[in-house]
Image (cartoon, grey):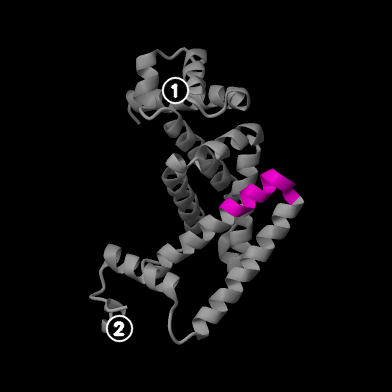
Amino acid sequence: MSQETDWATAAEESLLAAALARAPRLGWTRRLVAEAARATGLTEGEAELLLPHGARDLAALLARSHDARALQALCAHDPAGMKIRDRIRLAVIARCEAAMRDEAAVRRWSGFLALPSHVPLALRLLWASADNLWRWAGDTSTDENHYSKRVILAEILASTLAVWLASGEAVARTHLDGRIDAVMAFEMWKARAIRPRLGVRLAQRLGRMRYGGGPAPAKERHS
């Protein structure tokens, strides 16, 4: 690792720590970025170098730190010996627990990401979190399932964290179990279905766009 990378990583960690201490009071704002930068001794130019998009980049830093924290906790478990539903349940709980260690800041962070102009960023961060968790769970799919699995897990993760923030851990765990049950039931139905529904067909198209596999069937091309 280069000296510049060492400096950037250390500065980002210090900046995020300072921001987390101030976010409950300031919200996820430009003022938060400015005050966190001053608290860590960064010049305006250094802060802009690290966070060219300001609070948006700071939001991404927090999401990545929670992903890393969750994966570190999951290292204590071997997913190979678990049923898939147990892997996903454990992964979602680990990710939510990682976020809830910064609960006060996460409340302001989630409100920031819920703004219409920030929804694309929120979706990218959710996708990255779901991808990290699926990779820990051992997923190696490269077809349409690569996309559908991450879309489903991103929704489960987002809704479970929202319930955890609103109603507490016990209610969130019940919600999580219900969502996993619903997904497992859907997957069983899908396996028996003769024709895939719209969501599955969309995932198939995305899979072909990324990995190839020839043209769509004639019926799908004209649907």
Along the line of sight, the residue nearer the viewer: 76 or 166: 166
Amino acid type of the residue tagged 1 in the rendering: Ala
Along the line of sight, the residue nearer the viewer: 145 or 13: 145
Label 2, label 1: how many angstroms apart (C-alpha)? 54 Å
Rendered image: mark on residue 205: none
Q: Residue at x 55, y 41 (%)?
A: 66
Q: Quadrant of residue 83?
A: bottom right
**Magenta highlight on residue 76:** no
**Magenta highlight on residue 167:** yes
Horizontal placement of 72 versus 200: left or right?
A: right
Q: Quadrant of residue 49?
A: top left
Examine the residues drawn in magenta and state their main secondary structure. helix
Marks 2 and 1 in Cβ contact (< 8 Å): no
> Mark 1: which secondary structure?
helix
Q: Residue at x 38, y 25 (%)?
A: 50
State the image coordinates of residue 211 (x, y, percent, origin top left): 28, 65
Crowd band around label 2 with a 10 angstrom C-alpha radius: few (<14), some (14–19), many (20+): few
Q: Which residue is mark 2?
A: 219
Horizontal placement of 5 versus 179: left or right?
A: left
Q: Residue at x 43, y 79 (%)?
A: 196
Vertical placement of residue 70 versus 33, above or below: below
Q: Which residue is mark 1?
A: 11
| View extreme (left): residue | 214
State the image coordinates of residue 107 (x, y, percent, origin top left): 62, 36
State the image coordinates of residue 105 (x, y, percent, origin top left): 61, 32
Please identify the quadrant where the N terminus is shown: top left
Is residue 140 in view? no
State the image coordinates of residue 178 (x, y, percent, origin top left): 68, 65
Horizontal placement of 216 versus 27: left or right?
A: left
Residue segment shown in magenta: 158-169
**Closer to the eye: label 2 or 1:** 2
| View extreme (right): residue | 170
